[in-house]
Image (spheres, grey):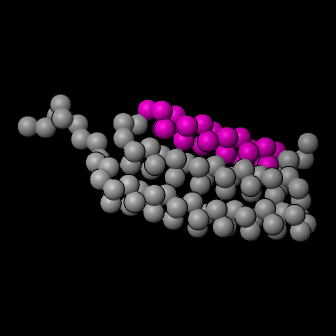
Amino acid sequence: MNIADTIAVLFICLGCFFFMTGAIGILRFPDFYTRMHATGKSDTLAVLLCLCGLAIHHGLCLDSFKLLLIAVFVFFANPTGTHSICRAAFRCGVKPWTNKENTP
């Protein structure tokens, strides 16, 4: 196993870790907005890391360029989509969570 394969495995494992933290965020956070924040941030980073790891593993070729191009599109599309979904939810009347136990 050479250094490029080691880096590729590291990137893919980090991507899987961020996918897992996003899934935990969906399960643990109390309302729609915090869940969208957790998934929007962690899934974007996870996809970027996994695609970059696959591009490194595949080597310098056209397929690697296509994978990196997909990563760039995901980098711009995922946060934009998350923002528009949250904005639509707010306009439809979905209220943010408030912790009523700690309010005076």
Quarter that holds the C terminus: top left
Vertical side of 77 occupied by 30: above or below: above
Q: Which residue is drawn at 78% across and 43% down?
A: 9
Is 59 positioned to the left or the right of 34 in the image?
right
97 vs 56: above or below = above
Quarter of the image containing the N terminus? top right
Residue 14 sits above or below residue 67 on the image: above
**At x 39% / y 45%, what residue is drawn?**
32
Position of residue 67 measured from the top left corner of the image (x, y, whole percent): 78, 62
Indicate the quadrant where residue 34 lies.
Answer: top left
Report x, y in % for residue 88: 40, 60
| Residue at (78% x, 49% y) in the render | 7
Q: Quadrant of residue 61?
A: bottom right
What are the residue bounds of the magenta stretch? 6-28
Task: Please say whether residue 71 is one of the residues in the magenta stretch.
Answer: no
Residue visible at 55% across and 37% down? 23
Residue 9, magenta (yes or no): yes
Q: Is the magenta stretch mostly helix, strand or loop?
A: helix
Identify whether 97 is placed above or below 4: above
Q: Relative to 46, is 101 on the left or the right?
A: left
Q: Nearer the viewer, residue 11 or 38?
A: 38
